[in-house]
Image (cartoon, grey):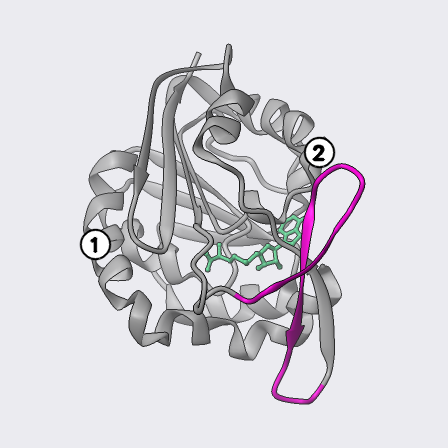
Amino acid sequence: MLDDYAARAPEYDLVYAKPERQSDWRAIEAWLPPVLGQGSVLEVACGTGYWTRCFAPHVREVLAFDANPATLALARQRVPQASVQFVQGDAYALPALPTLPTCPFDACFAGFWWSHVPRSRLPGFLRGLHATLRPGARVVFLDNRWVAGSSTPLADTDAEGNTFQCRRLSDGTTHRVLKTFPTPDEVRAQVHGMASDVQLDTWPHDWALAYRVN
Ligand SMILES: C[S@@+](CC[C@H](N)C(=O)[O-])C[C@H]1O[C@@H](n2cnc3c(N)ncnc32)[C@H](O)[C@@H]1O
């Protein structure tokens, strides 16, 4: 996946230009800041900072991390404000990160990350993530729904139920990318026993899980 994202970094934001998704993006841009609150935010797998730019003006500080230096470079240009720090880090290594100055955080946001986590790694990832957050911290995961005609077709499925897409880049290379489309019940079940105030919102192309860490 990292090779894929290093190659895709310059064209990653094309997804945000898809005409049929514009109404989702506008609605989510308005929905997200009030849900995250105004404190410190840890952003997981921030990519090019599309969502960082949306909520950063409303919060005290942001530590946004991604494994890929190419997307981080784009994010730093997009969101230059002093209250936002972009660092390289591995989501699977949480709670360890090179810089965790404000840990425990008041909130966490992860956009289009859940669907790239292999099903077997979700519990470990969530445990590590929750260890960086204060009790009661708000967590928001935003991700895609499957929409025929708009979503990239699924190429295959592995033994644990992870689905994969073959994505073709403008340089002609193709990349096999893990991309899951869990049902709402599957998403809720993953945080059962770890979360309260669980809320699942949907838009035509997207879903968001918001909850408070116990
Ligand atoms: C689909 S993109 C989402 C980017 C951004 N959150 C957004 O919504 O626009 C997934 C991101 O996960 C990053 N990534 C992949 N593996 C990672 C890992 N182990 N730890 C942190 N980030 C990772 C990729 O570099 C990529 O930027």
- Identified by mark 2, the residue type is Arg
Which of the two labelled residues, at mark 1 and mark 2, occupies the earlier sequence position? 1
| Left or right of residue 44: residue 170 | right
Q: Position of residue 189 (x, y in %)?
A: 52, 21
Check the picture and name the quadrant holding the N terminus.
bottom right
Residue displayed at 55% across by 35% down: 100
Q: Quadrant of ligand 1?
A: bottom right
Residue lying farthest to the bottom in this orientation: 171
Residue displayed at 29% across by 40% down: 60
Residue nearest the viewer, comparing 25 with 147: 147
Tell me: is circle 1 under 8 Å from ligand 1: no
The disc placed on residue 123 is none
Based on the displayed image, in which of its 4 quarters is residue 155 positioned?
bottom right
Q: Which residues, given as a range, are shown in magenta?
A: 152-172
Residue lying farthest to the right in this orientation: 159
The disc placed on residue 27 is 1
Based on the displayed image, in which of its 4 quarters is residue 135 positioned?
top left
Q: Position of residue 61 (x, y in %)?
A: 35, 42
